[in-house]
Each structure stands twice: as structure tokens, then as C-alpha cells.
Amino acid sequence: MIDSRRAPLAVSRLSLSLLIVLLAWPVLKAAEFNPGALFDAANLKVIGHFLAAFLPPQTGADFLSELFKATLQTLAIATAGITLALLVAMPLAYRLSRVCRSHPGLQLITRSLLTVLRGIPELVWALLFVRVMGLGPAAGVLALGLTYGGMLAKVYAEILESVDQTPARALQAAGANRPVAMLYGLLPLAAKELVSYTVYRWECALRASVVMGFVGAGGLGQLMDQAMKMLNGGEACSVLIVFLCLVVLADSLSTWLRQALDAPSQRQPSAFGLRSTWFVLLLMLSIVSSFALLSIDFSELLSLQAGQSMARFVSGFFPIDVSANVLAKSAYGIWQTLAVSVLGTALAAVAGLLLAVSRPRTLVNVVLNVCRSVPELVWATLTVLAVGLGPFAGALALALHTTGVLGRLFAQAIDNAARAPALALQHAGASRSMAFVYATLPQIAPQLVAYTLYRWEMNIRMAAILGFVGAGGLGQLLYVALSLMDYPQACTLIIAMLLLSVLVDQASALLRRWMA
């Protein structure tokens, strides 16, 4: 007998399943799904020659010296960018918090500003700053500062809202002003979570700093872009090896710092205090060294001449182009970007689940780490060679990177699932695969869906910029418009990116509530 209380939920899930089936064909068509292109003789020849040139890696003294400088520059861009993001995020997070009690109109302005900052991908910000300031790391630092400032402010405000508000209210009742109430009433309770998230964002900034090099913002990305364009596989291989090592080290450092901050020793508080002091000193040294290495003259950036140059550049984007042709092109770009993100995420979910249940686990972990360590834009450069220009290359690039991310998350969910139901089925004669499908999978299905939707939210933003290397969608349209200096059309496309980001946030939240 069907439980009447569960019937509405079953109908909702059936409706969602039918909607997915109906959308599958137009999504595949918009993404130009063509697996046969992977086996095309011409494409195989191109990618084969390029991959063959990867070995041996370039080890010339001059190139290694340049590679070392680019590595330091990448680290410095990530550190300086996240520092600037903190300066942007802290006042905005304060304005959003309940302690501040801002005017509703000011709250709306702050939220709209955050939507713009985090809705425009950092690669787009970097490209705009490169156009104004020229090639170099300054554009990358400013791009990270704006995009990650918006992200940090939103999450910081949510963290501050989630902790106990009683101490802050007590301080305000005793006569303390609002900033003091936040500083002494909320920050001590939220400090570990705030620091942990900031460290995670620094790790993300390291990957982003490599991606921004593809538009001339310096670091390893710029070196990789040069090697790719010259089809110099040896140099590309060396850059990729260094970046993979950098990501592994960043993962390890990030994990160690979070563990050190989340689990202080209660038996030796003085040791924890000393460890915190060394951490602060190391952090300050890293920040100062990063800005010194990049040699960014902020006084020049804040000068009247720089302001006038920026104003002239921004004024060129208005009035925006709302002609029928551009609006139609933008609408199709949105649809194609959506299709690329959906196809890439779906392929990754299937591949990630298959790898998560595969053996041997050591080899699988190596594959997953390689997949997620290589940025999507680097994967897109390779997939464009493998299948040609177009959105299908973007979908494959998203699938490769996201497989590494989802595979790791899916494996953790499987490890945490209760083993008793699967063992009971196996003792009853079921095969290992059948026991997984009927006992383990139903337990972890909500987690798998949540992880997949979360990655889809991130992939939609990345799909919007993969077109910078010829992978279709809004990114390709924007890159062409900027290259032709058609700034009104570029403004329309950037607004389309913002609209898409807002729609995806709302759709993802709705889907999570529907599937709960």
C-alpha cells in the first residue's frame, strides 16, 4: 500500500524525472554532443602529436628559471588576491549582518553589489583589467579581490548569522557600539569557521590564478597558454607537473591549517597560543612578500590618470546593445552555456560514481587527483584539440575536472554509509554490485544529488568562460566581442552572465528543496 503522506513526494520526483528526459535531447543538441569526434582520424592525429610532444618535459636551464619565477608569481597572486578580497569582504559582511541593522535600502544595495562581484567570473574581471592596465599580475590580483571578496562577504555574513547572537546583544545592551559588539561578541565564536573557509578560498584562488594567466594576468597560466599556442608539449608538460605539485602542496597545507585551527590542544593552551602566533607571523610575512614580489604600485592604480582611464573604458560599455540580433545571440549563448554545464556535470556524476566504487582504490585516487588538479580551462585547451572547437569540448573539459571532485566526494559518502544492509543482501546471495544498488545507493542518494547540484552551480559559472579557448557558450561570444572592441555588446553578454548566475542559484535551491 502506498503511504498517502509520501504520494505527493513521489509525484514530484516522477515529474522531475519526466522533465529531465524531455530536456535531454535539446541539451545534447545545444551542447553539440558528438562522441564520434573523439575517434576522428584528423583529431586523433592532432592530439596524438601534441601529447607525444609532452615527453620528455622541458628541462632547459633558461626555461626552468622562467618556470620558477612564474610559480612564485602564481603563489603571490593568490595570496595578494585573497588579502584584497578580505579587505573587500569584511565591511560588506558587516553590512549584511544583523548586528549592523542597516537600512533595508542599504541592505538591498549591498546584496546587489555582492551579486555583481561574485556573479561575474574572475576570468572576465581579469580580462577587463588587462584591457585597462595592460598585461601583468596586477589584473589578476584585482580580479581575485573583487570576485572572492563577493564570495567571502556572502559566506562570512552567513557564518556570523549562524552563531549565538546573545553575547553581541548583551554587549550592545551594556552600551557597546555595533562594531565592538561584533568584534567581541560574534567573531570569537565564528573565528575558526571563518579562518577555515578563508584558507579553503586561498586554495581555490591558487587554481584561479593559473586560469587567469590565460588572458595575460601572469603566473603559470600565462606560461601554459604560451606553450599551448605554440604546441610546445615539453614546456606544457613541465608547467603542468609544477602546477600539480603546487596543488598537492596547497591541499596538504590547507588541510593541516584547518586541523590545527579546528582542534587546538586543551592540555597545552600555551603551545596552541605559540602555534597561533607563528601562524600569524607566517601569514603576515607571506602577504608582505607577495606584494613585494608582484611590485604592484597601488598609488598609481589610485591616481587621477588611472581613474580617468578606467572611466573612459567603462563608459565605452554604455549604452548597452539591446538590438534584436544581440539579444537573440545572448539568449542562445545562455542556453548553450546551460547545456554545456548540464552535460558536463551529468557525465562527471556517472564517471565519478563508477570510479568511486572501483578498485584498486590507490590507482583510482591518483586518477581523481589528476582530474581535479588540472583546471577546467587547461582541460578545455586539450579537449578543443581532441574534438575541435565548440561546446562539446567545453562539456568534456567540465566532465574531466568535475569527475575528480565528485568522485572523491562520492567515495567519502560510500565509505560513511552503513555496511549492514549491503552485507545482509550479500549473505542472502546477492552479488556485490546488486547489494550496492539496493542497499548502499538508497542511503547515499540524497548526498549524491546534493553534491551534484552544488558542482552544477559552480560549473555553470565555469561553462560561461570556457569559451575563451573556443569551447562555445557565452564565454566565446564575450571573448569575440571584447576582441573586436564591441563593448556595448560585451556589456549585454556580461549582464546575461549575471542573470544566468542568479537564475542558477534560485533553480539549485528550488531543486534541493524539491528533492529533500
Image: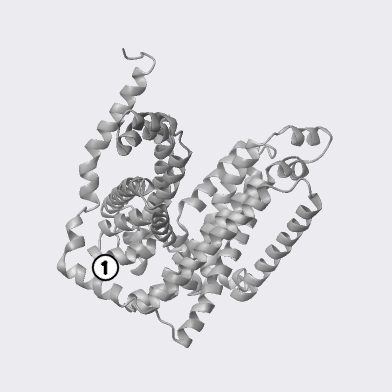
Image-based side of 271 in relation to 374, left or right: right
Indicate the quadrant containing the N terminus: top left, top right, bottom left or bottom right.
top left
Viewport quadrant of the C terminus: top left
Residue 113 vs residue 199, the one in the foreground: 199
Q: Is residue 195 above or below residue 186?
A: below
Whole-percent x, y for residue 470 in the image? 30, 64
For the point 58% across and 54% down, which residue is it? Answer: 255
Q: Secondary structure at mark 1?
A: helix
On the image, the x and y values in percent for residue 112 come to 52, 45
Report whether residue 256 is seen.
yes
The quarter of the displayed image where residue 2 is located? top left
How are the colours assigned in the image?
A: one colour
Identify the residue under disc 1: 385
Q: Position of residue 467 (x, y in %)?
A: 33, 61
Q: Indicate left or right for 27 with 299 as reference.
A: left
Q: Is residue 254 left or right of residue 233?
A: right
How many numbered badges does the structure rendering display? 1
- Mark 1 is surrounded, within 10 Å at the Cα level, by few (under 14), some (14 to 19) or many (20 or more) other residues, namely some
**Residue 475, position as x, y percentages in the image:** 35, 59
Q: Quadrant of residue 34?
A: bottom left
Q: Residue at x 67, y 51 (%)?
A: 261
Give the farthest residue toward the left: 41
**Left or right: where does residue 417 sit relative to residue 151?**
left
Vertical position of residue 434 compared to residue 154: above or below: above
Inspect the image, locate mark 1, and give the three-letter code of the amino acid beneath it: Leu
Is residue 299 in view from this perspective? no
| Residue at position x 31%, y 66% in the image | 382
Q: Nearer the viewer, residue 396 or 458?
A: 396
Q: Is residue 411 above or below residue 444?
A: below
Q: Nearer the viewer, residue 147 or 55?
A: 55
